[in-house]
């Protein structure tokens, strides 16, 4: 007795070789299931480079060579940001070609145009908010305590109350009239706030530019 178990140095039988080969040729799914977490099987081909894997590789942007080309690229970028594809495409009906760049997506649609006409057809105290504020700030520098108290506690609150009251009136009026003429318009939501914000601007500085005169009755389009 040598002390070794029986069969240690015996040659493997043909059946044992067949079993080992069948185990090695088992499905990769079964072998991967037994592997520890984070195990990555070997690939048959090398990992492709990023340049080769991208279907449409990025091409370098050609810098404008002249000032005219740079200006055209700048205008095109502004048009994309404002949601207007090209002025020459005719996508904005009834809008002059030189004014289409002033239109945002929130300005499009017949309901928004009618809301602008309602605001532009009348004068309001809200459009003079900025000069009123500057005048009140200048009046506060007058070295008279009684006058300063009157400006700070009478004139300023009165102006703010006027702005709020006029904004509420304009918002309700625009909501009611636009809902009557354009009940199915997609941009009816927020149209009251849209009209109120336009009312706070100087008439000459409003964009898009006013299409109706003061006192002229706006007509639904």
Image: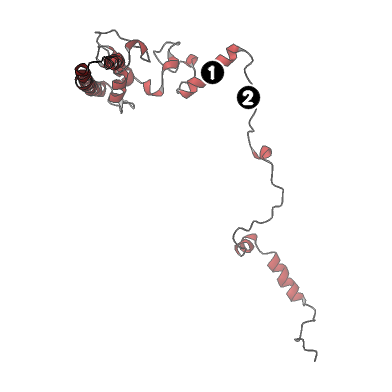
Quick check: can you spot residue 44? Answer: yes
Left/right placement of residue 94 relative to residue 65 reads left
Quick check: can you spot residue 220? Answer: no
Left/right placement of residue 68 relative to residue 82 reads right
Image coordinates of residue 51 in percent, x first then y, are 67, 37
Q: What residue sits 67% from the left and 64% below the top?
A: 26
Image coordinates of residue 108 in percent, x first then y, are 38, 21
- Front residue of 197/49: it is 197
Q: Which residue is mark 2?
A: 61
Image coordinates of residue 9 in percent, x first then y, are 80, 81
Q: What residue sits 30% from the left and 13% below the top?
A: 131
Q: Earlier in the sequence, mark 1 or mark 2?
A: 2
Left/right placement of residue 121 relative to residue 75 reads left
The residue carrying pointer 2 sits among few (fewer than 14), some (14 to 19) or many (20 or more) residues within 10 Å by Cα, namely few
- Front residue of 133/37: it is 133
- Front residue of 150/119: it is 150
Q: CA distance from mark 1 to mark 2?
A: 14 Å
Quarter of the rendering containing residue 166: top left
Q: What residue sits 24% from the left and 15% below the top?
A: 125
Q: Dividing the image into 4 quarters, which one contains the C terminus?
A: top left
Q: Dividing the image into 4 quarters, which one contains the N terminus?
A: bottom right
User: In this rendering, is residue 9 above or below 122?
Assistant: below
Q: What residue sits 63% from the left and 20% below the top?
A: 63
Q: Which residue is mark 1?
A: 74
Quarter of the rendering containing residue 68: top right
């Amino acid at each position: 007795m040598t002390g070794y178990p029986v069969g240690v140095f015996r040659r493997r039988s043909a059946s044992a070789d067949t079993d080992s080969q069948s185990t090695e040729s088992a499905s990769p799914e079964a072998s991967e299931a037994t592997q520890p977490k984070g195990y990555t099987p070997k690939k048959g081909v090398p990992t492709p480079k990023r340049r080769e894997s991208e279907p449409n590789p990025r091409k370098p942007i050609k810098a404008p060579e002249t000032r005219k080309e740079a200006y055209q690229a700048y205008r095109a970028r502004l048009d994309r940001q404002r949601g207007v594809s090209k002025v020459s495409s005719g996508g904005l009906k009834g809008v002059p070609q030189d004014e289409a760049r002033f239109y945002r997506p929130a300005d499009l649609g017949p309901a928004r145009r009618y809301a602008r006409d309602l605001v532009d057809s009348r004068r309001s105290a809200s459009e003079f908010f900025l000069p009123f504020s500057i005048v009140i700030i200048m009046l506060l520098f007058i070295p008279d305590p009684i006058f300063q108290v009157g400006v700070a506690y009478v004139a300023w609150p009165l102006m703010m109350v006027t702005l709020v009251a006029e904004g509420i009136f304009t918002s309700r009026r625009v909501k009611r009239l636009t809902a009557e003429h354009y009940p199915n318009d997609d941009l009816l939501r927020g149209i009251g706030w849209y009209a109120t914000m336009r009312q706070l601007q100087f008439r000459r500085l409003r964009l898009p530019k006013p299409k109706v005169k003061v006192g002229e009755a706006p007509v639904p389009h």
